[in-house]
Every structure is written in C-alpha cells, then in structure tokens.
Image: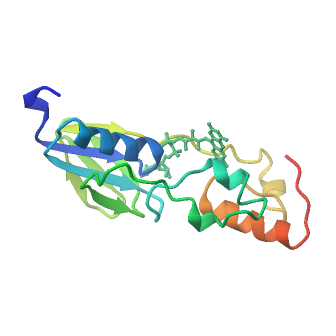
Amino acid sequence: MPGDLKDGRIVIVGASLAGLRTAEALREEGFAGSLTVVGDEPHPPYDRPPLSKQVLLGQATADTTGLPMRRDPDADWRLGVRATGVDLLGKQVLLEDGESLPYDRLLIATGTRARPWPNPEEAALDGVFTLRTREDAGGLAQQLAAGRSACW
Ligand SMILES: Cc1cc2nc3c(=O)[nH]c(=O)nc-3n(C[C@H](O)[C@H](O)[C@H](O)COP(=O)(O)OP(=O)(O)OC[C@H]3O[C@@H](n4cnc5c(N)ncnc54)[C@H](O)[C@@H]3O)c2cc1C
C-alpha cells in the first residue's frame, strides 16, 4: 500500500463478509488510520450459507454462524444502525440516528436484498418466509422442528 494511503479515515458500510474481509485486508496491507464499519444488522459479521443448510437441518443454531476473524481489524463497529445516505461533497456517511461519519475513503459493501414474495397478501400468510438473516433462519428452523415441511 503506498504511504499516502496508509492513513486517514476509512468508512465501510456493510458489516458482513465483504466488509469484514476488507477491514482485515486493509490492516494486513498496513493501513494505520481510523476504520469504521457500519452495519444495519445488530450482529457482528456472520456467515449466511449455513443458514439455509446446517441451521435448517438442525445441525447448528442461527447464532453460531459468526465469521471467524483472520485478525483483529481494530475497527469501530457501528452495528444496528443503517446508513441512509452519503454527502459526497462533504465526504460524510449519514446514519439513521442522525449522526454523520466523516471519511477520506468509503467502501459500500451492502450486498443484496432478498426479493420479496411478489404478492403482498400471500407474503403475509403464515408459513411464507424470507430467508436472508439469522432471524429468518432461526424462525424457519423453529417451524421445521415443529414438523412443518418446506418448498421453495
Ligand atoms: C440463506 C443464504 C444462503 C446462501 N448460501 C450460499 C452458498 O451456499 N454459497 C455461496 O457462495 N453463497 C451463498 N449465499 C450468498 C452469500 O451469503 C453472499 O454472497 C455473501 O453474504 C455476500 O457478502 P456481502 O458482504 O457482499 O453481502 P451481505 O452478506 O449481503 O452483507 C451486506 C450487509 O450490509 C448490510 N446493509 C445493507 N444496507 C445497509 C445500510 N444502508 N446501512 C448499513 N448496513 C447495510 C446488510 O444488512 C448486510 O448485513 C447465501 C446467502 C443466503 C442469504
């Protein structure tokens, strides 16, 4: 990493796989400035693939899929708060709680969203689930353990 990039303030929006691995890589490459990771979920980074496999098979619980850290990225974790915008001229990330985070460099690693069931009335029916988060997987696993079957 060139010397002029080793300092300053980096904000990463998205506290999941990409956000965590980027934070780790920045430190590995010698970034010594301030690092802030913003995530709208309340959890530290966790792995999603097991949510639709081991968790639904009852081989793991949804709260045990945390991503291992390869190194401590020495970051300020701002979890459970959504970024609502970016002031590009002022170089600030705007948070839903009204705070703003100044940055010199910004990474947006917000991944994707689950596509909702197209018909809202049907989506509201008992037994229709979205599977994206820990909470989703935990709820579905509970239903399966109670004897319901699933199709998708
Ligand atoms: C149930 C399930 C099973 C999967 N199985 C597999 C598999 O078997 N194999 C495979 O290769 N991939 C699988 N995937 C996909 C894999 O999990 C993703 O590719 C991976 O999580 C992408 O990581 P990411 O960090 O880019 O994004 P994400 O994991 O989507 O993380 C983005 C994060 O940013 C947060 N965020 C979004 N907007 C904001 C905002 N405005 N402010 C703050 N935070 C925000 C999100 O809440 C989320 O926490 C699966 C995904 C799911 C949901």
152 relative position to 96: left or right? right
Residue 41, percent from left and from top: 48, 60
Viewer-side residue, 3 vs 34: 3
Query: Which residue is situated farthest in the bottom direction here?
Result: 146
Residue 24, percent from left and from top: 31, 44
- Name the quadrant containing residue 38: bottom left
Residue beneath the point at 22% across and 37% down: 105
Residue beneath the point at 80% across and 48% down: 119
Query: Which residue is situated farthest in the top direction here?
Result: 2
Residue 62 visible in the picture: yes
Residue beneath the point at 19% across and 35% down: 89
Residue 25, percent from left and from top: 30, 38
Residue 131 visible in the picture: no
Viewer-side residue, 134 vs 130: 134
Q: Quadrant of the N terminus?
A: top left
- Name the quadrant containing residue 134: bottom right
In the rendered picture of this protein, how many numbered marks are placed on residues?
A: 0
Viewer-side residue, 28 vs 125: 28
56 versus 112 height, above or below: below
40 versus 138 height, above or below: above
Residue 56, percent from left and from top: 76, 59
| Quarter of image, ligand 1 | top right
20 relative position to 116: left or right? left
> How is the model colour-coded?
rainbow
